[in-house]
Amino acid sequence: MKTLIVGDIHGCIDELLDLVEAAGLRAGDRLISLGDIVNKGPAPEEVFDFLSRRPNTLVLKGNHEARHLDLPGDGAGAAPPERITRAQFTREGYGRFVASAREFPLYEELPEALVVHGYFEGGLALERQKPHVLMGRERGRERLVERGLWPWHEHYDYPKPIVVGHRAYSDDGKPMIVPGRIYAIDTKCCEGGALTGLLLPGFEIVTVPARRDHWRVIQMAWGSFDPASGERFALPRLRPDTAAPPSPAIPAPPAAATREVGADLPPPRRDAVVGRRPWWARGPLGWAWRAWHDQDRF
Ligand SMILES: [Mn+2]
């Protein structure tokens, strides 16, 4: 029997199914999600349904689950990721998700490795770890910084390798691996990176590319959605992007004419080159967005 540990899914159902296929996972094999199955991605209910119906499947509690559990029943005061997630779910589906997320465990200990969503506090027994440290909440990070234990993985001392998600530790889009010790496999799928899994017992990395920068597309589309409409907030599925046929080759213009032809072209569309920050996050309101974005966001 194999075990596939999968990083932060954040509603990316297509990539989750791609990864399960790429890993060659069979029904009898085990699937463990590191948590953060919702927020910032296109299809949280589909991800939740898949994980809750699949046998031999476990979901750990991440900080994004905790953010939903912190909200009052009517969702008052929710930040954009939670508001959008609530609008993506059916009412019944959201109720099932919240009830279920309350029971998600904070860690799983396998024969080969310890598995948690966020961080581990060195010098402290497993049973005495703080939930907000294990879930990777901002308070947990502050605690580790105050105790001189940041970055936490340099102080990790549990006598087994640890598998975590929650944030990308490496700039190259790849997981951060210290062989035999640290397997940090969040590679920012919902922001256009990749969904990464770790197959046990062999500690093999399996990875599939994100279909797009989902979170950026969702934030831009959200501006034209009326949350009071009673409809679910859903974007058209555009699959399969990654398998799109190559666009036909454009013949090069004759060399001598290039400059004149170019001079007649309209200037490049500005919206084709905007960065990842949505239009509504720029300008004065952008500061409010950033204030939210800078805390507890991974
Ligand atoms: Mn997280």
Image: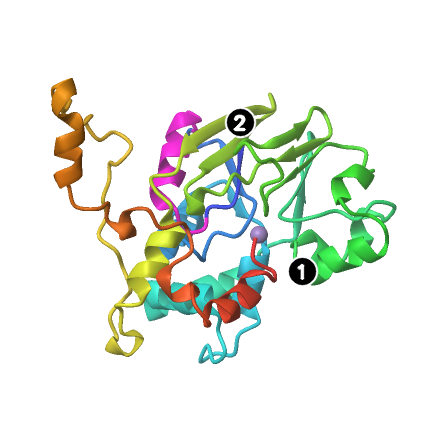
Q: Position of residue 47 (x, y in %)?
A: 39, 50
Write down the residue under mark 2. 2
Please say whether residue 34 is visible from this viewpoint: yes
Q: Position of residue 48 (x, y in %)?
A: 42, 53
287 on left or right of 230: right
Q: Residue at x 50, y 40 (%)?
A: 56
Label 1 CA crowd tier, 10 Å (few <14, some 14–19, many 20+): some
Q: Amino acid at mark 2?
A: Lys
Write down the residue under mark 1. 138
Residue 32 marker: none
105 on left or right of 93: right
262 on left or right of 179: left
Q: Nearer the viewer, residue 54 or 254?
A: 254
Ranked by sequence position, the earlier of labels 2 and 1 is 2
Residue 97 in the magenta stretch? The answer is: no
Of discs 2 and 1, which sits in the foreground?
A: 1
Q: Position of residue 246 (x, y in %)?
A: 20, 25
Q: Amino acid at mark 1?
A: Glu
Span shown in magenta: 10-25
Q: Residue at x 61, y 62 (%)?
A: 295
Q: Residue at x 79, y 48 (%)?
A: 121
